[in-house]
Image (spheres, rainbow, N blue to C red):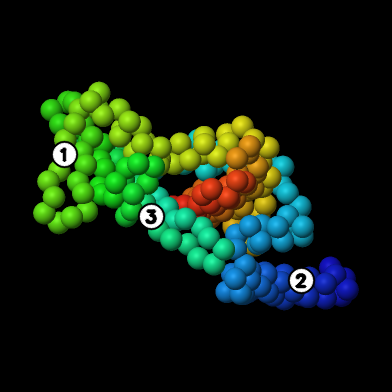
């Protein structure tokens, strides 16, 4: 190897990690200074080239853990307000789906809603947030709307509702290990980012400003 190539190689060993660190610090500083996910994604799309090899199915079809938790927050100009937590648990013989609403949503009062199995029959249960309140149990056929409402908070439904399976998706690789996808549907602008095959946060910005949401994802 010539001396010039050795010098270029040595410079690259310093410059590339330095640029990665600067990029990470810059993105962190943007969040601290009030930039939201949409602002960050606009900067990424302006300065990075989308990768045609990236496939969002890693976060749709391939994401199927035995247990995961979704934490929902409403987005405003200055803050995010948590309002719901959905947990899917397929570990064991009897899978459960639990939705906890911290406030009234879509005509459903605050409380804990659950889909579970008893004696080979599927039930929906509801427990108000008051400590001394009693749990109400119904067969699914008796409360189909409650059943479908709990299901509407699942990851699969989020992906379908936001159009992730059929809209034109642009994918970006950042710092070599962060994946980000963005796409527009008829009702929202959507952003998802994650690490490897694990989604971390989904942002759904409603076009009509009725309800913009952030959904945080964890496999526990």
State the residue position of label 3.
83
Horizontal placement of 214 versus 10: left or right?
left
Task: Please rate how many residues cluster around mark 2, counting C-alpha atoms within 10 Å: few if below 14, some from 14 to 19, many from 20.
Answer: few
Q: Nearer the viewer, residue 203 or 120?
A: 203
Residue 183 position (above or below residue 32)? above
Of the numbered discs 2 and 1, the one sitting upstream in the chain is 2
Q: Nearer the viewer, residue 212 or 198?
A: 212
Residue 160 position (above or below residue 208)? above
**Residue at screen point 63% across, 71% down:** 30
**Residue at screen point 61% across, 74% down:** 33
Residue 98 placement (x, y as % from top left): 29, 44
Residue 137 position (above or below residue 11)? above
Horizontal placement of 173 versus 83: left or right?
right
State the residue position of label 2.
12
**Residue at screen point 36% across, 51% down:** 84
Task: Please rate how many residues cluster around mark 1, counting C-alpha atoms within 10 Å: few if below 14, some from 14 to 19, many from 20.
Answer: few
Using the numbered discs, state the Cα–Cα distance from disc 3 to disc 2 in whole angstroms: 47 Å
- Is residue 75 among what the camera can see? yes
Of the numbered discs 3 and 1, the one sitting upstream in the chain is 3
Residue 143 placement (x, y as % from top left): 26, 29
Residue 10 placement (x, y as % from top left): 76, 75
Q: Residue extending furthest front?
A: 107
State the residue position of label 1.
136
Using the numbered discs, state the Cα–Cα distance from disc 3 to disc 1 in whole angstroms: 22 Å
């Amino acid at each position: 190897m010539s001396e010039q190539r050795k010098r270029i190689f040595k410079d690259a060993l310093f410059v590339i990690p330095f640029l990665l660190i600067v990029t990470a610090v810059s993105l962190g500083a943007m969040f601290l200074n009030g930039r939201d996910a949409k602002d960050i994604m606009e900067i990424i799309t302006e300065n990075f080239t989308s990768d045609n090899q990236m496939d969002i199915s890693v976060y749709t079809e391939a994401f199927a853990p035995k247990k995961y938790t979704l934490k929902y927050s409403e987005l405003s100009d200055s803050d995010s307000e948590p309002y719901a937590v959905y947990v899917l648990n397929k570990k064991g013989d009897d899978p459960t789906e639990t939705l906890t609403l911290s406030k009234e949503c879509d005509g459903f009062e605050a409380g804990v809603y659950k889909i579970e199995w008893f004696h080979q029959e599927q039930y929906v249960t509801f427990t108000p947030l008051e400590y001394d309140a009693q749990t109400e149990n119904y067969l699914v056929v008796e409360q189909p709307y409650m059943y479908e409402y709990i299901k509407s908070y699942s990851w699969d439904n989020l992906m379908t509702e936001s159009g992730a399976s059929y809209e034109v998706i642009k994918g970006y690789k950042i710092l070599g290990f962060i994946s980000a996808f963005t796409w527009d549907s008829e009702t929202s602008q959507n952003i998802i980012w994650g690490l490897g095959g694990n989604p971390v946060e989904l942002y759904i910005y409603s076009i009509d400003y009725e309800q913009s949401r952030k959904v945080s994802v964890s496999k526990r």
